[in-house]
Image (cartoon, grey):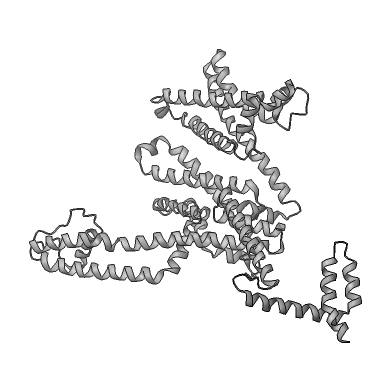
Amino acid sequence: MTTHHAHSHPSALSIFYKWVFDPEHKNGFYEVVERSIAFLIVASVLAVLIENTPEIYNTHTAWFHWFDVVTVGIFTAEYVMRVATAHLNPEFASQRFPRLRYALSFYALIDLVAIAPFYFARFVDVDVEMLRVLRVLRLARMFKLSRQLIPAWHEFQMLNEGRSLRAKVFAMLEPTGHSGRLHSYIDNFVVFWIALSITCVVFETVASVRSLFAVEFEVIDVMAFTIFTIEYIARVYTAPENPKFKHLRMPHWAHVRTGQAIIDLLAILPFILESLFSQHVDLRFLRVFRLMRMLKLTRYTSAMETLFKVVMREWQVIFASVFVMMLLVILTASLGYLFEHDAQPDKFENIPQSIYWAVITLASVGYGDISPITPLGRALTVVLALVGIGIFAIPAGLLASAFTDQLRIDREAFKQRLMHAFEDGMLDNSERELIVAEAERLHLSHDEVKRLTDEARSEFADKEAANHTQANGLVLDAKAHPALAAAQFKLLIAQLSLIAQATGEVALRKGLEENKTDVQTELDVLALIVKPKSEGA
C-alpha cells in the first residue's frame, strides 16, 4: 500500500528534476534553463573583465557587487539542486552513493570552482593580492559551458564516425543533417564575435570610451581577426564537400568567388592592410570598413536569401512602382523650382537641388531646412505630403506581402520534399540528413518541423488511399446511380469470366482452395460463372 502510494505521488525532487534537468522530458524547461545559465555565464565573465577598468568599476562598485551576488546565488542553487537530484540522474542512479559520486564528477567540480572564490573571499581573511587572484579565478565560470560543449562534441563524433577530416570540418560550419548541436554552438560563437567586434568598432569612435578601452579594443580586434581568418580558411578548405561545388573541377576557386566568401574576405582585409602598410600610408579610414563584418550575419539567417528571391520574383512590379516614384519626384522638383526659384534662389537654385526637397517631402519626413514660402509652393507641399504617404508605401507593401508569400512557398517546398521522402514508405539516413539540413537552412523550429512532417505524412497517406481506390476501380453510390452500378457489375462479371476461361476451372479452384481463409464465397461465384459454360458445352 505504501509502495503504491509512493509511486502515485512522486517526490518534489523527482518533479523538479523532471521539469528542470531532464532533457528527455519534452514539455520541461531543460533547454530554457541551459540557455539561461549559458547567457549568465557569458555575462558574468564579461563583468569580471570590465572590473579591470577602474574608471568604470569604481563608480559602479555596488552594481558589480550585486550582480556578482545574484550570479553566484543562481549558480549555487543550480549546484545544490544538481547534487540533491543526482540519484535521479540515469548516469548516477545505478551507483552507490549517487550524490557523492556526482559531487566528485567533472561537471560538479567545475560548478564548485565557479562559486568557490566568492565564498572563500567572504569567509576567509585574504590580502589584496589574494583577492585579486580570486577575482581572476572567477573566469573559471567559463568552463561551466563544457556541460553543453562536451556532450555536443561526443554527439558530433558519433554522427560523423568514419567520415574524413574535411567532411567533419564542413559539418561544423554548415548544416548537413549530421552536424548535431556542435554546428549551432559554433554558429553562435561566430555570431557573438561578429556582434562584439562591430560594437567595438562603433564605440571606438567615442573618444572617452576609446581612452578607457584602447587596449581591450586592440585585443578584441586581434582575436576577432584570428577567428574570422580561421573560419575563412576552413570554408575554402571544405569547399569540395559543398554540394554546390563538389561537381566542379575547381571547387575551392568556385567558393572564393561567391558573395559570402567575398564578404568573409572583406571582414579580415582591413586588419591585414593596416598591419602591412600603416607605417607608410595613413590607413585609419579602413577601420570603418571593419563594419563590413556585419554582412557576415547574412549567412546565419535566411532573411537575405528570401529577400533576394522576392526581389527577383517581383522585380517587374517593384520596378514599376519605383518608376512612378521617380517620375513623381522629377515632376515635383520641377514644379518646386518653378514656384520657388524667384523667392528662394539660394535654396531652389536648380532642379537637382530641388530633388532633395521633393524626396524629403514625398517621404513625409520634412526636415525643415528647405521649405516653400510662396502660396503655390506651400499648396504643392501639402498635396505632395498627402500623396507621398500612399506612393512611398507601395514598395514597402509589395515587399512585405511578397516576403510573407515567399516564406509560405519555402515551407510548402519543404513539405513537398517530405512527401517525396515518404514515397518509399520510410526515411533513410540520406533523406533524413537532407531534411534536417533544409530545416536548419530555413531556421524552422522543432515544433514547425514536426507539424510539417505530420501534414506531409497525412497528405501522403490520403494520396496513397486515393491512388489505391482509383486502381481498384470507380466506386459508385448504387442508390444514386443504379444504371452505372449495374454496368460496372456486368463489367466485373465479364472480367471474372475471362479470368476463369483463361486459367481453367480446375486450376482456378485449386488455387482458391490453397488459400487458408474461408473461400466458400469465391468458389460459389466461380461455380456460377463456369456453370453456363459447362451447360452450353
Q: Nearer the viewer, residue 58 or 461?
A: 461
Task: Give the quarter of the figure containing the C terminus.
Answer: bottom right
Q: Nearer the viewer, residue 413 or 297?
A: 413
Residue at 72 percent of width and 58 percent of height: 428
| Figure quadrant of residue 533 | bottom right
| Figure quadrant of residue 458 | bottom right
In this view, the residue farthest toward the bottom is 537
Q: Residue 408 in the image: state x and y as whole percent.
A: 49, 60
Q: Is residue 456 above or below residue 216?
A: below
In this view, the residue farthest toward the front is 535
Instruction: State the count of labels.
Output: 0
Q: Nearer the viewer, residue 441 or 448?
A: 448
Residue at 21 percent of width and 53 percent of height: 367
Q: Is residue 293 left or right of residue 26?
A: left
Q: Residue 190 in the image: state x and y as whole percent.
A: 54, 47
- Residue 234 visible at all: no
| Figure quadrant of residue 141 | top right
- Residue 30 visible at all: yes
Q: Residue 237 in the image: state x and y as whole percent.
A: 64, 58
Task: Give the quarter of the figure containing the N terminus.
Answer: top right
Q: Is residue 149 left or right of residue 371?
A: right
Q: Is residue 480 above or below residue 357?
A: below
Q: Residue 123 in the image: state x and y as whole percent.
A: 56, 13
